[in-house]
Image (cartoon, rainbow, N blue to C red):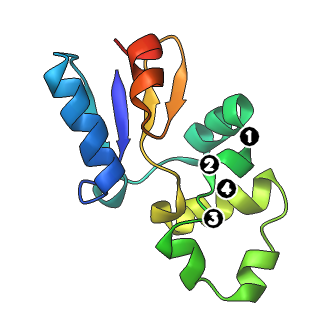
Amino acid sequence: MVVYGIPNCNTVKKAQDWLKQNKVEYTFHDFKKAGVTASKLQEWTKQLGWQALVNKKGTTWRQLDPEVQERIVDEASAIALMLEKTSVIKRPVIETGKKLVLGFDENVFEKEVK
């Protein structure tokens, strides 16, 4: 299992705490240090849709110029933005080996991650 995110994100911290409490082994992939590839983002958008991956409620999105926000209209433009600004990706992204889980919801984790 791989948990993708940034270490200072509260939602990522909650997810990691849950995983540790439930003794679920995982590898952490730090977007800030290790980045993310276009092929990985394409894989995720095929499963979740680009709209789910772009966190429009987060600080990074809100700090973008409105003109930049308006240009994010399809998978290609969303992937280009996520490659440039990895902190705009909704976090965490968890590859369980069977499924892709986005964000932290304890009920979803009980069913999909344990």
Q: Quadrant of the C terminus?
A: top left
Tell me the amino acid under the disc marked 1: Gly
Tag 1–tag 2 contact (CB < 8 Å): yes
Q: Which residue corresponds to mark 1?
A: 49
Q: Residues within 10 Å of mark 4 (few under 14, many from 20)?
A: many
Q: Secondary structure at mark 4?
A: helix
Q: Nearer the viewer, mark 4 or mark 3?
A: 3
Residue 92 is drawn in which quadrant?
Answer: top left
Q: Check residue 53 in the rendering and tell me which mark sits there, or answer none.
A: 2
Q: Secondary structure at mark 3?
A: loop
Res. 88 visible in picture: yes
Does residue 42 appear left or right of residue 33 in this picture?
A: right
Mark 1 to mark 3: distance in Å? 14 Å
The residue at 60%/43% (across/down) is 41
The residue at 25%/24% (across/down) is 26
Tag 1–tag 3 contact (CB < 8 Å): no
Q: Earlier in the sequence, mark 2 or mark 4?
A: 2
Tell me the amino acid under the disc marked 2: Leu
